[in-house]
Image: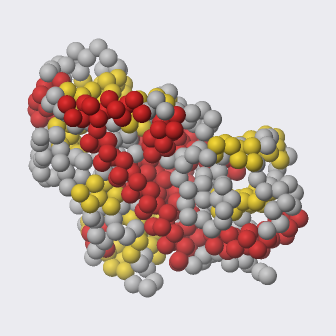
Amino acid sequence: MEHTGMDADVVVAGAGPTGLMLACELRLAGVDVVVAERLAGPTGESRAGGIHSRTLEVLDQRGILDRFLAEGELQPVGHFAGLYLEFDESESRHPYPLMILQSAIERLLEEWAAELGVRVLRSAGVSGLRQDEHGVTVELDRPKAGPATLRARYLVGCDGGRSTVRKLAGIDFPGTEATMTALIGDVELPELTEDYVWVRRTPAGDYSAIAFEPGWFRVITSEFDRVAGRDDAVTFEQLRASLVRVAGTDFGMRNPRWVSRFSDAARQAAEYRRGRVLLAGDAAHIHFPAGGQGLNMGVQDAVNLGWKLASVVRGRAPQSLLDTYHAERHPVAARVLHNTRAQSALVRPGPQTDALREVFGSLMVSDDVNRYLRHLLNALDIRYPVDGDHPLEGRRVPDADLKTAEGVIGVHELLHAGRPVLLDLHGSPEVAAVAGGWAGRVDLVEARGEDDHWTVPAIGEVAAPAALLIRPDGHVAWAADEGGAGGGDALRTALTTWCGPAAHG
C-alpha cells in the first residue's frame, strides 16, 4: 500500500459543513489537518436549507458571517412542526434564521479552509483504521489513485449518518427506527405560483416547496404510511408520485437535479470519543430534520471540539479535556432528537393530530412557550456544565458592546482568532496578575462595557460582569461581578481546566 507522505496532526473524515468547520478551527489554532472526502467534488445538492441564530453567532465570532449573509435571506419567522414561531431581537444580534442552501455553505467553508491552508483530499474515503497509544493509522480508498494511508495523532469522523469511522471504531449507534418516509429533490415547478410553501399538511401526508433560485424549488414530501428500506433506490418518478399523493398535483414537476430520501429514524452515538477517534455531526447523531437543526448542531459540535483537540495536540492540555466534548455535546443532541421526535408526531395526518395541533398552537401564543420552543431550535439557551454559579458561566457570551482603545466593538469580535479571551471590564490588578501564567495562550483584554446589564436568553437581564473568561467557542468558563473579580483561585482553576496548566508559578 502506497504511503502518501501527508501525515498530519488530525485527519478529518468528511468535507461537509461539520468537517470543514472543524478543519478550519484546528488550523486557526495552528494544527496540521487533512480532510479526507470520498466524493470527487462538491455535490451542488441543496440538502439543508438554513442557519439558526447560534450558528450565525459562531460564524460572526470567526469574522466570516458576512460571506454567508451575502448569499442567504433572513427570515423573520420560523416554525415548530409547521406552527409559526416568533423570534426576539433582544436575544442576539442575529435573531432570525438565514435561509441558505447547504451547497452554498459548503462552498463558503471550503473557500475559508483554503485560505487557512487546510488540505482537502478528494476521492479519498476512509476504509480502515488502527489506533495505538501514539496515534491512528487511517486507510484510504482512492478509486483512481489506489489505496493509501495517513498517520495522524487523531481521527475525527464527520462522514455522515452511515459513518464508516463510527463503524470501524466499534461505537454503538442506538436509537429508534423509521416510522415514515420523506422524499426530497431539487426540481422545477412551473405551475406553482408561490415562492415558499412551508409545511402543508394533507390527509395523505405533508409537503413543502421552497424557491432557492429563479424557477428552482427544493421539494419535500412526507408520507406516514410508508417506510422505505435504507438502501432502496430513489427516483424522480417516486418524488413526482409522492407529491401527487400528498398535494393532489405535481405542479408540472420537471428537470430534477437531485433526489434523495430521509426518515424519522433517530440515533445517537453512545460515545463521541473512543481513544484517538472522535465523532461529530451526523456521524454522532441523526434525526428527523424538522426545524433544520442537524447542520447547525454539527457546526456547533465542530466549534466545541476544535479548540479542545488543538490544545491537546499542541501539548497545552491533557487528553482529559477531550472528555468534556462528549459531556457537553451529547446532551445537546439528545435534546434535538427528543424535539424532532415530537415534531414528527405533530405533523402526522389525522383528526387526533389535528386536535393536538390546535391545542398546541393555542399554547404557543404564550411568550414562555414560544421562547422555550425557539430555544430548542436556535440553541441560544444552552448551558454547559461548567463549575461556578454565576448566571453567565457555561452559557454563550452575549455580544455586548465594549469600549476599547480601538473604539466600540462587540464581544464576539474578540474571538476572531479562535483563542480564549480573559475580558477585564474593571481593570482588576489581580485578574492581570493571574493571567500572566497563561500569557501567549489567553488574550487578556481590558475594556469597559457600554451597558449595565446584558440580556441572556432563558434568563433575561443580568448585571454586566466585572471580568470573565471566554472559551474559544464563545461559552463563558468563569465570570465575576464587581467586588468578586478578585476570585483569583476560581480564575486559576478555570484557566487550568480549560487552557491547561500555567506556564509558571
Location of the C terminus by quadrant is: bottom right
Location of the N terminus by quadrant is: bottom left
Identify the image's colour scheme: rainbow, by chain, secondary structure or one colour: secondary structure
User: Can you see residue 282?
Assistant: yes
308 sits to left or right of 174:
right
Q: Position of residue 341 (x, y in %)?
A: 30, 48
Q: With respect to residue 313, does 468 lie above or below?
A: above
Q: Quadrant of residue 353?
A: top left
Question: Residue, x 45% and y 83% (percent of image)?
Answer: 134
Q: Residue furthest bottom?
A: 133
Q: Nearer the viewer, residue 396 or 499?
A: 396
Question: Residue, x 36% and y 47% (percent of image)?
Answer: 339
Q: Nearer the viewer, residue 102 or 117?
A: 102
User: Can you see residue 107?
Assistant: no
Q: Nearer the viewer, residue 17 or 452?
A: 452
276 sits to left or right of 494:
left
Question: Residue, x 39% and y 65% (percent of image)?
Answer: 279
Q: With respect to residue 420, does 349 lie above or below?
A: above
Q: Position of residue 141 (x, y in %)?
A: 26, 65
Question: Residue, x 40% and y 54% (percent of image)?
Answer: 335
Q: Position of residue 116 (x, y in %)?
A: 55, 54
320 sits to left or right of 252:
right
Q: Please tell me how many numbered marks the rendered image carries.
A: 0
